[in-house]
Each structure stands twice: as structure tokens, then as C-alpha cells.
Amino acid sequence: MGRVIFHRSFVVGLLGLILVLLVSLPLYHPSTYVLVLLTAIFMYIVLTLSWVIFSGPTGYISLASAAFFGVGIYTSAVFGKVISLPLVIGIGALASFFLALLVGALTLRLRGIYFSIFTFGLVVLIQQLLLWWEVVKMHTRGRFVIVVNNTTIYYVMLIILVVLMFTTYLIRRSKYGLALQSIGEDEEAAAHSGINTTVLKTITFAISAFFTGAAGSIMATRWTYIDPYIAFNPLFSFLPVLMAIFGGIGHLFGPVLGATIFGYLEEVLITKFPYYYMLIFGTILVIAILYLPGGLVGLMQKWQKGDLAGQHGNS
Amino acid sequence: MGILEGEGVSKFFGGLAAISNVDFDIDHGDIVGLIGPNGAGKTTLFNLISGALVPDSGVIKFRGRKISGLKPHQICKTGVARTFQSVRLFANISVLGNVLLGALFGTATGISSRDANREATELLEFVGLSARRAIPAKDLTLTNQKRLEVARALATKPELLLLDELIAGLNPTEAAQAMELVAKIRDRGVTILMIEHVMKAIMSICNQIIVLHHGEKIAEGTPQKIATSKRVVDVYLGEQVHAGS
Amino acid sequence: MGMTVLNVVISGLLMGGIYALIAMGLSLQYGVGRVFNISHGEFIMVGAFFTWALFSAFGVNPLVSLVIVGPVTFIIGFVLYRTIFSRLRIKSPSPAAFEGSSMLAAFGILFIIQNIVLAIWGANIRGYTYLATGVNFGGAVFAANRLVTLSFAIMIGLAFYIFLARTRLGKAIRAAAQDPVTAGLMGININLVLALCFGFGALMAGLAGTLVSMCYSVDATMGLGYTIIAIIVVVLGGLGSIPGSFFGGFILGLIGSIVTYIEPGLSLAAYYGIFMLLLIVRPAGILGR
């Protein structure tokens, strides 16, 4: 009876229904609060899913999400007044893409820990560089961002999310998805099977950054004033990791589930218990790492034991 | 015709020579055995050929073209495949998936996923794993894991196959089956270079043997010649007699 | 001209002393315990906050606080290792998996510690003045507190080095760093040693925090910058090499001082530049394994 839930056409139908609902939502004049909340949840799903695209199968833990997010935010601030919105988002996404290519080319040839360390400090590095640039060269700190109405932000975020989910699905189903997994299983054996691991890792990392950057570009319009500290916040490296691990990395819906739960909690708790909720999030991450290696979805799948051990090891 | 040539190949770790000035010339269609005591440098030599390591001096050529210095994935695509001493599979990927990866990425020319699927299925048939195609690789027995590793290597359409201790850990029946498989692979036109400790197998199937000791080549020739070489017996085979070759 | 050079050099050494301490601590945690503790900077921050709190509330001399803060951060580190990391080590299927999951767990701990401090003391920047008077040194004037900081940093560093080289426990630690399995077979209680190492690493961070608070302002987000610097020094000096971290700290401090003299605000970028160079050319660092 439980098996029916993962049947392919059922899932597609369900997704289609949800999509229709979400697209038509603004027509029912929901409150600003609901619109903004949903947009935020979409954003967290995008951040988490894009993190999982690379770090999930390969096991290379990127802590650079906040850096790419920030790059997206800053492109919005810099170009927002001069260029149309879609172009701004495109530039933000591409800037993150190329930054990731650079970082990947430098560090993905080395052991995973060096990659993680490098990405960890990237947020603060860019933050300091921008700060220096603004203070010393421009003599101002921070910028003002153009204002965009909430419904537009909602739709743009939704579009980014849908494109991302589609991309994730395509990658997973393709030979590259399988190759990425093999890199995570045994990189040397993968290389000996003909896979150009460095190139594949770098490009996948860049794709992941692309979407994170796009999300940053559109979300920037939610803050009217940004400076390097606001835009480059390590929190946005932490949250995707938390959401993915808690939700479950190996499965498509794990990150979505994790992002929805924590995205909702974050938005709700941030005003009432600013520091306590972060404390709890940190604790949950530690507990999840210790006791919930497959995440929430992994837990659910254990209950459904006997489910076909997937064609490529994941559903 | 020499399919694999090595000239003056050396590799140092710190001050220690793991491989020292080794020459070799392997002919197309041969099954060549690579033997020697533990620590002689056999797996290091494999690593140098497959690209996992880069020689400090000397040159390795495959079909006349230099491959030393190339990356493993490039060398794989030129037609050299290998298995590993400690079987290295993609544990959580299915048996079919493991072989599929070799078929999809291991050749220089592109391949459609339908063709790759077909080839992978054929190979599973060839090694006798068709019934287990959907099982994750980690759930296989050791014997089957070794079969899978061979299938994955063959999926890359190699002209030269490096087998690293294929028989280790197998009982006599399984070992005999493994040797049959090796013969069948040779019959498909693949040249084989194999590291082995089990003398009976080496002597029975190889037509050439290379002996390494402390990183140097100390002997080379037919099984007959090697078995009767005093030097080799002293250094290596003497031990083997007691090990129940 | 000579005066400027002296200025830059001494400033560099002052900062370098702090860097040396925090890098040694991190090196110990990674070199022996194999935990890449990215929450290291938070222990520095805790040390700094504690010292400030003790000074502001009870007028406790910061140098005295060294003796209080040290044990506190040591215990926190020790307990964290026993409860979280040792469990993780047992559960991890491979050393590489442990490296990854322990780093992530440290990431969680980073946010836990930072937010506990924020919840207690808020987000405002704190500070106090202690020994802010000028001292004449070779013709240039330096703040007394910075000279005291440097002296203590060197003393603590040397004391630690002697501890590792001479005492039984120190030797056990070095054995465990070389080869945990054999060390265990030799009768060394590996679990205890690993936890102690982590605790000592936290101790160094706490002490460094106290010293930092004597010269600079304190706020809940200060930790991250120090963590990154510690990481760069550890890579510079060779992952896991304690003497390498000690000297690497001073080298980085000097470089930072030179860069700050030329173009203030770019010191972190310079460190990262060096970091990138090292990763490309020689990831094993200067004194690396």
C-alpha cells in the first residue's frame, strides 16, 4: 500500500498539481506575509537543491553557498538600476558560475578537505575584498537596491526553482549523474573508467553556483540596502547544508523537504527568538550528522524496506 | 608487435626506488605474468602504466605512442584498462551501473546509452553476472565482485588489460574459473598483463613472465625458462614451493 | 626608514604570536584528532568574552583570567570531543568520511557557540582597556598590552612545545599523531588522548582569546576571521606540524603587517593569495608531512 506513493506517474501528477496551485496563488490575493513566506521557502529549496547537485553525489562538501548567493545579491545592487531584471539575474547567475569555475579549477584537483576549507573562507574573503573596494576606492559603504514588487519576486523565484528541479532531474538521469555518483564512491576507479573527474566536478560545481547566484540576484531586491556584511553572510552556507542533511541527500525530495521545514521555521522564528532558534538549528545539524545519516527521507525509506534498491542507487 | 613498451622506467618514493630502470616489451596477444616477492614493485608498475602514478624517469609507450604522463582517464580511453588489488567498485551503484560507466566513458568515441546498455548486458553475460544486474555492488560475494571489476574494465574496450591479483582470495574451483575467463578474454583479442602469486596459474596460462625484485627486473622469459632459472628460484620461487604452488 | 621597518616588523610579530597560538591549537586538533575544527575561532571568541565579562563585572585582571579561561575552554573542548567527535569516529565508515562529517559537525558547533554568546551578551561590540600605556622600545612606541600579549604568546607556545617534547603525556600525543593504531597497541588510551588533544586545542584558543581581548575589541562574530587565519597558517606550516604552525603564525603575522602598511584592509586577501599559491604549488606546506 505504501509503495504506491513513489510510483512515477503519480509523482509527476502530484507535482503538476502543486505547480498549478503555486502559479495561480497570486490570483487569489493572498496576504503579503504568505507571498513573502512562500518566496523565502522557494529560495531555501533552491539553495539547498543547488548545493546537493554537486556536494550530494560527489561527497565534496562545499561551504561556499553564501559566497555565490552574495555575488548574486551584489550584481543586483550594481546593475539593478541600469539593466532590466531578467538580465540582472542572468549576470548574477553567470558571475557566480565563473567564480565557481575558477575556484573549482584551483581546488578540485586536490583532496576534498582542501576544497571545503577553501570554500569555507571564500565568503569572508569576498566580503573583505568588497569592503576594501567600497571604502577605499568608492568612499562609500553599501548600496541601495531597486525595489521590485513581491509578486514579481515570487514568480521569478518559482521559475528558478522549477528550472533547477528540472535540471537536477536531467542530470541525475543522465550518464553524468551516474558518473558524479561514481566519483563519490571511488574517484580513482572512476578516473580509470575513463571519466574526466576534474572537469566533471568543476562544471557541476559551477552549475550549482549558477542557481545559487540567480537566487541571490532576485532576493537582493527584498533588502533595500545591502553592504558586504549583509550580502555575504555565512548563514547562507550553513542553512543549505543543514536542510540537505536533515532532509536526506541521496533523494530528490530530501532537500526539498528539509528546506521547506527549516525555511518555514527560519522565517517564523527569526523575529521572535533570534538567537535561540539558530542554536537549535546548530544542535539539529549535529544530531542529524550523528544519528540521521540518511536524513528524514532515509528514515522514511527504511520503513519502506523492500523497496527496490534503485537502478543507480538512488530514486 | 609490441603493444606496450617501457624504457628505463623508474619511480622513487622519498629516497627509495620502488621501480628502478625497468624495461619491458609486451607483444599483442600475449598473456604476460608479472611476479615477484611482496614489495617488489608490481602494483607500482601497474600504477605507472595506468596513469595513477607518473614515472620519475623513463618512458612508457602504448601502441607506439607515449602514455606516461597522461591522466588515468586519458590512458583508459587509449585502450588500457585495469583491475585493482583491493577490488575497487562503486559500492552503492548497481552491478549493471558499474559496467555501464565503463561502457559510457571508457572509449575515445561517443556511444549512445542504448548501445552502452546493450554492451554492458553482454559483458555481464560474459562474466556470468546477468542474474545479479540490479544488486548494489557492495552486496556481491568477493568472487562476483572480481568478476564485476573485470566486466567494468572490459566495458572500456581495452586492447590491454592489467589484472592485479585476480585469483587472490579465491578457492581452487573459483581460481580455475578465473583462469578460464582470462583465456576467453585473450581469445577476444585483448592482451593481458597479470600480477599473480599463485604459480600454478601463472605457469599454466602465461606465455611470457617478467620477474621483479626490489623494483628491478631480474628475469624475463617463458614459464619454462623462469621455472628453471636459479636466480628466480632463489629469490622467489623457493618460497613458493612451500606455499603450495 | 629604519623606524618604519622596525614598526612593521614588531607589529607583525605581535599579531604573529596570536596566530601562532591559534594555529598550534588547530594543528593539534587536526593533526592528532583528525578533526578539522572550523569552530576553532568561536573558542577564541568565548575566551575573549569571558575575559571581558570578568574584567567588567569583577575587575579581574586579564592575565589572571588566563588561568580561569584556559580550563574552561579546555573542558568545553574535551566534553565536545567525548560526546560528539569520538562517537562520529566510531560510526564513520572511512577516515575520509570522518573528516567530512566531523567538519560539518564542527560547523554546527560554530553556530551553537556563537548563538549562545549572542543570546547571553547580545550583538554589541565590547571592549575594555588594560595596559594601554605606551612603552618605548628601540625608539618606537608600542602599547604595553601588545608587548605583554606577545611575551605571553611566546611563553605559552614554548611551554606547549616543551610539554609535547618532554612529558609522558606529550609523547603519547605525538605517538598517537604518528600512528593511532600502533599507539593503541602500545597501551596508550587512544580515546582519552584524542579527547585531551582536542581539549588542549580549545585551551590554546581560549588563551589566545584572552590575549586578543587585551588589545582589541570583542564581538560575537569575531571568531570566523581567526578560524580562517588559523587554517591558512596550519596549511602554510604543514598540516599537523606543531612547530610548523608556530613559525607559520609569525610568518603570516609579518606578511599581514607588511600588507597592512602598504594597503590596509587587504591583509586577509593577501593571506588567501598565499593560501591559493600553497595549494597550487605545495599543499604539504613548508614543514609538511
Image (cartoon, coloured by chain):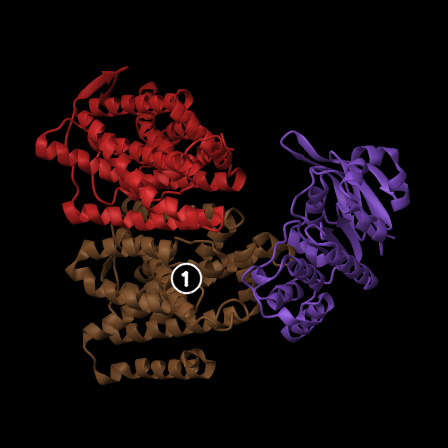
Q: Is residue B143 above or below residue C163?
A: below
Classify residue C21 by image quadrant. top left
Q: Which is nearer the eye, C108 or A84? A: C108
Q: Is residue C128 left or right of residue B213?
A: left
Q: Is residue C121 visible?
A: yes
**Chain containing the residue with disc 1:** A
Q: In this view, does B230 lie above or below A159?
A: above
Amino acid beneath label 1: Gly
Q: Which is nearer the eye, C187 or C135? A: C187
Instruction: Name the quadrant of the C terminus of chain B.
Output: top right
Q: In this view, does A13 lie to the left or right of C156?
A: right
Residue C156, image x, y percentages: 31, 24
Q: In this view, does A222 lie to the left or right of B219?
A: left
Classify residue A300 by image quadrant. bottom left
Q: What element carries label 1?
A: loop
The count of marks equals 1
Judging by the rendered image, the residue that carries numbered circle 1 is: A294
Q: Which chain is brown?
A: A
Classify residue C126 by image quadrant. top left
> What residue appears at the point 31 percent right and 69 percent down from the top-left corner?
A260
Q: Which is nearer the eye, A102 or A26? A: A26
Q: Is residue B22 visible?
A: no
Q: Which chain is red?
A: C
Residue A57, image x, y percentages: 49, 61
Q: Which chain is purple?
A: B
> What residue appears at the point 34 percent right and 70 percent down from the top-left corner?
A85
Please tell me how crowded label 1 is: few (under 14), some (14-19), or many (20+) other residues with Cα within 10 Å: many
